[in-house]
C-alpha cells in the first residue's frame, strides 16, 4: 500500500514536467489549478491541503533543478517558469538500459521506436493510461536517471 501524498507528488510532478515540456523553451505561468484541479479556500482564505501539496511540489522541482521560475504569484502559480536544461535533456532522452525496450518496439523502425520511448512520451502515456504504481515507478526512474544530467 502506498502513501497517497507520495502518489499525488509523483502525479503532480509528472503533470508539471509535461506541461513545461509542451511549452519549452517558452516561459509560462504555471497555475496550480491546472495541475491539481480547482481549489476553494476556506473562510480564512487558506488553501486546501491538496492545493498546498501541489504548490510545494512545484517549489521542490525548482529547488532540485527540474524547473526555473522568476517569481511566485501568492500560493497560486509560478511566473515565467521553464524546464531546466537538465530536465529538458532528461525528458528528451531514451532509457539508459537498452534491454528495457520491449519486443514490440524492437520490431518497428528505430526512429519510431525512439520517438515512442523517449521519457517524455512514456510519461505522457503513464499519465493518460497508467496506474499510480506504474507512474511512481517511472518517476523514480526519471529522478534516479536525472543525476546523470547534472
Image (cartoon, rainbow, N blue to C red):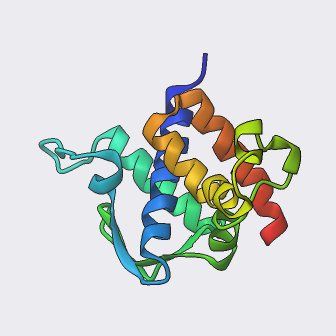
Q: Is residue 70 left or right of residue 64?
A: left
Q: Residue at x 48, y 59 (%)?
A: 18
Residue 9 appears in the rendering: no
| Location of residue 58 in the rendering, given as x and y in whole percent from the top left corner | 48, 59
| Location of residue 38 in the rendering, given as x and y in whole percent from the top left corner | 21, 46
| Location of residue 109 in the rendering, given as x and y in whole percent from the top left corner | 70, 57
User: Relative to residue 137, is residue 25 depicted above or below?
Assistant: below
Q: Residue at x 58, y 37 (%)?
A: 135
User: Relative to residue 78, is residue 120 depicted above or below?
Assistant: above
Q: Is residue 47 left or right of residue 120?
A: left
Q: Residue at x 77, y 37 (%)?
A: 103
Q: Quadrant of residue 71?
A: bottom left
| Location of residue 79 in the rendering, given as x and y in whole percent from the top left corner | 36, 77
> In what quadrant of the picture does the C terminus appear?
bottom right
Q: Nearer the viewer, residue 137 or 94?
A: 94
> In what quadrant of the picture does the N terminus appear?
top right
Q: Residue at x 12, y 43 (%)?
A: 43
The outermost residue toward the top is: 1
Q: Nearer the viewer, residue 93 or 53?
A: 93
Q: How many marks?
A: 0
Q: Nearer the viewer, residue 51 or 118?
A: 118
Residue 105 appears in the rendering: yes
User: Relative to residue 116, is residue 39 depicted above or below?
Assistant: above
Amino acid at each position: 500500500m502506498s502513501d497517497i501524498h507520495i502518489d499525488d507528488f509523483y502525479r503532480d510532478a509528472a503533470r508539471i514536467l509535461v506541461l513545461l515540456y509542451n511549452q519549452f523553451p517558452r516561459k509560462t505561468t504555471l497555475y496550480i489549478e491546472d495541475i491539481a484541479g480547482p481549489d476553494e479556500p476556506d473562510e480564512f482564505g487558506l488553501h486546501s491541503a491538496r492545493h498546498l501539496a501541489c504548490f510545494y511540489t512545484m517549489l521542490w522541482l525548482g529547488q532540485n533543478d527540474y524547473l526555473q521560475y522568476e517569481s511566485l504569484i501568492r500560493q497560486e502559480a509560478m511566473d515565467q517558469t521553464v524546464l531546466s536544461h537538465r530536465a529538458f535533456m532528461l525528458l528528451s532522452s531514451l532509457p539508459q538500459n537498452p534491454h528495457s525496450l520491449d519486443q514490440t518496439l524492437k520490431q518497428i523502425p528505430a526512429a519510431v521506436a525512439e520517438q515512442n520511448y523517449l521519457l517524455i512520451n512514456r510519461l505522457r502515456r503513464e499519465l493518460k493510461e497508467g496506474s499510480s504504481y506504474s507512474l511512481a515507478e517511472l518517476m523514480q526512474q526519471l529522478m534516479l536517471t536525472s543525476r546523470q544530467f547534472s
